[in-house]
Image (cartoon, grey):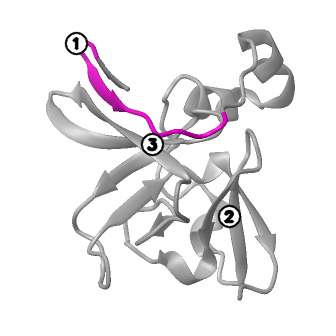
Amino acid sequence: MLLINFFKTKITLAKEKMTKSKEDWKKILSETEYNVLRDEGTERAYTSTLNEEKREGNYYCVGCNNKLFSSKMKFDSGTGWPSFFESYPGAFETSTDFKLVYPRTEYHCAKCEGHHGHLFDDGPEPTGKRYCNNGIVLKFIPEKIS
């Protein structure tokens, strides 16, 4: 399905969606989490404790527990937000946003459609990608990664 409007071109993939009302989201998310995940806000750079997280484990969506990244995909981009060069397959859907006038690739959780950040082409090998993620909408679980 391709849906086009003035501000975004949304590309969706087939995956079971989780839906909640605005009121239900406000019951389970903090005000800051809600602002980022549901209203496409951005947390201030260098405010997330996950930016410095170095343990082995996985990163999940705070809204729906969808597995998004492993610690093996993480790198220090120097931007002040947790950054990853790859995500788990099918974790995200992308759209193009023009909020800063120029087009940027925005990514949302494929399960709950929550906003996580923007995808750039200035990351390290092997992908050259940088998923610049708001740490407030990530949940880190230390665990062995196979």
Q: Secondary structure at mark 1?
A: loop
Q: Amino acid at mark 3?
A: Glu
Q: Which mark is residue 59?
A: 2
Question: Residue 87 lies in magenta, yes or no?
Answer: no
Q: Earlier in the sequence, mark 1 or mark 2?
A: 1
Q: Which mark is residue 93?
A: 3
Residue at screen point 38% across, 72% down: 77
Q: Report x, y in % for residue 102.
A: 13, 34
Residue at screen point 35% across, 65% down: 130
Q: Secondary structure at mark 3?
A: strand
> In front of the other: label 3 or label 2?
3
Residues at marks 3 and 2, CA–CA distance in whole angstroms: 17 Å
Q: Earlier in the sequence, mark 1 or mark 3?
A: 1
Q: Which mark is residue 106?
A: none
Residues at marks 1 and 3, CA–CA distance in whole angstroms: 18 Å
Q: Report x, y in % for residue 36.
A: 56, 33
Residue at screen point 29% across, 84% down: 125
Q: Amino acid at mark 1?
A: Phe
Q: Secondary structure at mark 2?
A: strand
- The residue that label 1 is drawn on is 6
Image: magenta residue range: 4-16
Label 1 Cα crowd, 10 Å radius (few <14 / some 14-19 / many 20+): few
Q: Quadrant of residue 1?
A: top left
Q: Report x, y in % for residue 42.
A: 48, 38
> In front of the other: label 1 or label 3?
3
Q: Quadrant of residue 50?
A: bottom right
Q: Is residue 52 above or below residue 92?
A: below
Residues at marks 1 and 2, CA–CA distance in whole angstroms: 32 Å
Label 2 Cα crowd, 10 Å radius (few <14 / some 14-19 / many 20+): many
Residue at screen point 76% across, 22% down: 25
